[in-house]
Image (cartoon, helix red, strand yellow):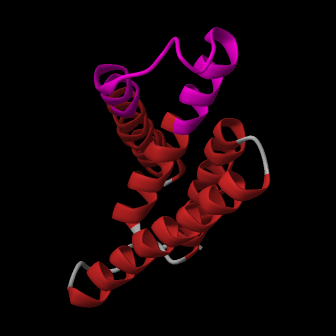
Amino acid sequence: MAQTNRPYGLRTLAIDAGILVFFWLLGFALVQAAERLTNPWPAAEIGQLVAAAVSLGVAVRLRATIAAFLTASFAAFLLAEIAIHLLFGIRAAQGGPTHFAVLGAALIGVLLGAFVLRRVQRGTNTQAA
């Protein structure tokens, strides 16, 4: 059975906002734990990635579209940033322009992926009928 998206209203907006607050709080807690317990940079970024992945799972489960797009974009950004830092070192890829470029690319990638997925699903639904 196909899931339908719930209409946007205050309840849906509150669910999206709640998931984003959960994401921020979980990420903050994991970064603080990494700062105090281990070598900060890889553990902190991995903690943020874990927070994004968990929040994405919650957003998908609750069908919170806005929160799902934002947490998926942030997870893609963190994966790319961790890969860049592991390959080139922590100091090689620093600064605002680098972060905004990678974050923008992650957001565009998630939006394009969602667009393509909807097109593919729409195409298979019309062929089955």
Residue 4 shows up from this direction: no
Where is residue 23? Give x, y as percent.
Answer: 50, 66
Q: In this rendering, is residue 28 above or below 112? A: below
Q: In which quarter of the image is the N terminus?
A: bottom right
The answer to which of 72 and 83 lies nearer the viewer is: 83
Report whether 80 appears left or right of 30: left
Where is residue 66? Give x, y as percent.
Answer: 34, 62
Q: Is residue 93 magenta?
A: yes
Q: Does the magenta stretch include residue 24?
A: no
The answer to which of 63 and 33 lies nearer the viewer is: 33
Q: In this rendering, is residue 121 above or below 77? A: below
The residue under the point 64% across, 47% down is 44
The residue under the point 68% across, 12% down is 87
Where is residue 122? Give x, y as percent.
Answer: 41, 48
- Total tally of numbered discs in the picture: 0
Report whether 120 appears left or right of 5: right
Q: In which quadrant of the rendered view does residue 79 lie?
A: top right
The answer to which of 53 and 5 lies nearer the viewer is: 53
Q: In this rendering, is residue 33 above or below 109? A: below
Q: In which quadrant of the rendered view does residue 19 lie?
A: bottom left
For the record, the magenta segment spans 78-103
Q: Which residue ends up furthest to the bottom in the rendered image? A: 11
The residue under the point 41% across, 46% down is 118
Where is residue 59? Give x, y as percent.
Answer: 51, 69
The residue under the point 45% across, 59% down is 68
Report whether 51 appears left or right of 70: right
Q: In which quadrant of the rendered view does residue 30 lie?
A: bottom right
- Please, what is the dominant secondary structure of the magenta stretch? helix
